[in-house]
Amino acid sequence: MNTAMKLSGFVLGLAAVFGAAYGAGQVTGPAGPVVAGHDGGAAGHDEGDPAAAGHDAGDSGHGDGATGHLPGGLLVADRGYTLMPVEAPKSEFAFRITGPDGSPVTGYDVSHDERMHLIVARRDLSGFRHVHPEMAADGTWRIASPLASPGVWRAFADFTPTGGAPMTLGVDVTVPGELTERPLPAPANRTTVDGYTVSLAGAPQPGRSATLSLTVSRDGTPVTNLEPYLGAYGHLVALRHGDLAYLHVHPEGSPGDGWTAPGPEVSFITEFPSAGAYRLYLDFRHGGVVRTAEFTVHVGEPGSVSVPAPGTPEPGPGTPEPEPGTSDDEHGTPGHEHD
């Protein structure tokens, strides 16, 4: 990924996939969702059969639209690599990546300070975690389970196999229990997390590059000493509402490059390839803690986030808190330390 990294890799021809709000994981992931915390581990996925996902392990999804491939996270198998959850205690989440020869992959390039980025989100987008598991000698990745509540979750493994290209594979995981669906929050230009206010500016349009800028303040004061996290001052993940297509970009510039300021503004060059609703998750570190600010944006539709008018002041100590529906604290993930 470079400093002009784009949210890219899929096209308007995916409308049929985009419309499958809850079942997309069943189509593009395993034949049945993995069950976590049931009989001591994960079940419902045949580790020895990559085709159990409904895809040939070597099928990259080419042939869809002008770009020739599907968006990240919609496939459980791509270019010969397959994401396979494995048995684990209820308190853990474990998986392997198998390569074109069917063996577990043990060689990974470091990307943004880590060899593996695991992102999980509930399918109603009411939960989100970005964590970093540890790999055992046999190629099994393990971490304390980031699946926080009952429901169907999508787990994304974001990695670069040694000698290969970056890729993101996804699989559905079911956490048993009583499920309470939550509606997607309304679009908003501002949200709060742990006393921090994060403002979003930008006018994303489908199929066009656009800059999204996120500005961090605390008690009305701009935060000008953001701390590096995974080699950057912020990380942005977007998930498309409906099929949970995964989009991941990093900000322009990097700490120590001589021109990138440590806040309050972090800017990203993005490209949303289709109209629709997206959930954005900004990870930033301050005071030694990584927090996640969440937004809903409607790209190319009424209610889209737009650039604030010139001269619009940042929220100050006397600025009212966002009205219900503009702050995502109840829907999303409060500030937390990332693993």
Image (spheres, rainbow, N blue to C red):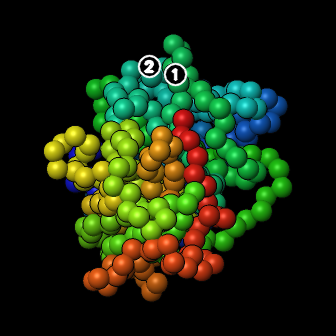
Compared across the picture, whether 180 is left or right of 184 comes to right
Foreground of the two, 292 or 175: 292
Q: Quarter of the image for the C terminus: give it.
A: top right
Q: CA distance from mark 1 to mark 2?
A: 8 Å
* In the image, residue 260 above or below residue 272: above
Whether residue 15 is visible here, answered yes or no, is: no
Q: Which residue is mark 1?
A: 135
Viewed as shown, does residue 143 lie left or right of 217? Answer: right
The residue lying toward the viewer, choosing from 217 and 301, is: 217
Compared to residue 21, the image places residue 299 above or below, namely below
Determine the residue positioned at 61% across, 55% down: 334
Tell which circle, 1 or 2, labels the residue nearer the N-terminal end: 2
Foreground pick, 238 / 334: 334
Provide residue 280's location: percent of width, then percent of height.
Answer: 47, 62
Type of amino acid at the residue the image marks with label 2: Thr
Q: Amino acid at mark 1?
A: Met
Residue 222 numbered tag: none
Locate residue 6, reporting x and y percent: 28, 56
Question: Which residue was labeled with disc 2?
Answer: 106
Q: Is residue 335 above or below residue 200?
A: above
Residue 313 against residue 129 in the figure, above or below: below
- Where is residue 208, by image quadrant? bottom left
Residue 316 picture location, percent across and down: 45, 74
Q: Which residue lies at the image location 49% right of the left edge and 65% below the top edge? A: 219
Image quadrant occupied by the N terminus: top left
Residue 216 figure quarter: bottom left
Residue 315 left/right relative to 270: right
Q: Are marks 1 and 2 in contact (CB under 8 Å)?
A: yes
